[in-house]
Image (cartoon, rainbow, N blue to C red):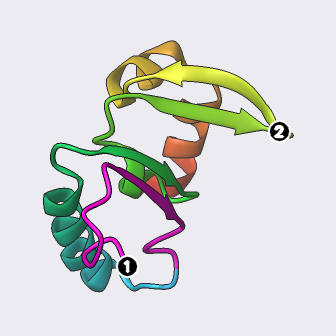
Amino acid sequence: RALLKNAPILILDEATSALDTESERAVQAALNELMKGRTTICIAHRLSTVQHADVIVVLEKGRIVEMGSHKELLARGGHYQKLHQLQFRD
C-alpha cells in the first residue's frame, strides 16, 4: 500500500517480524529506500529493525522509559542496552 500511495508518513508495525535474518535484510534494504524523505513510525521488537532510526523510543508497560539514538541508548546502559545484549549476544 505504501508503494501505491505516495504517503508522506509510513507506519510499519512489525514489518519484518515473521522473516528469517536473510529475508529481513533484503526487506529492510527496500524499506530504507521507501522511507527516504518520509516520516516513519516503526514498531518492532527486533532491535536490528530500528537501530538506524533517528530517534528510538523504548516502551515498557505502555510508558516511555528511554528515548535517543541507538548509540545514545547503548551508552546509557538502560532497558535498550539490556535488550541489545539479549538479542545480539554471541
Predominant secondary structure, magenta span: loop
Quadrant into which the N terminus falls: bottom left
Residue at which label 2 appears: 62
Q: Position of residue 21 (x, y in %)?
A: 33, 78
Whichever of callouts 2 and 1 sits on the residue coming sooner in the sequence is: 1
Identify the magenta region. 1-17
Quadrant into which the C terminus falls: bottom left
Q: Residue at x 33, y 24 (%)?
A: 71
Residue 5 appears in view = yes
Q: Position of residue 87 (x, y in %)?
A: 51, 56
The amino acid beneath tag 1 is Arg
Q: Position of residue 67 (x, y in %)?
A: 54, 21
Question: Is residue 42 found left or right of 27 in the rendered image?
Answer: right
Q: Position of residue 9 (x, y in %)?
A: 38, 49
The magenta stretch spans residue 5: yes
**Quarter of the view holding residue 82:** top right
Residue at which label 1 appears: 1
Mark 1 neighbour class, 10 Å CA radius: few under 14, some 14 to 19, many 20 or more: few
Residue 89 appears in view = no
The amino acid beneath tag 2 is Gly
Q: Nearer the viewer, mark 2 or mark 1?
A: 1
Question: Is residue 1 found left or right of 82 in the rendered image?
Answer: left
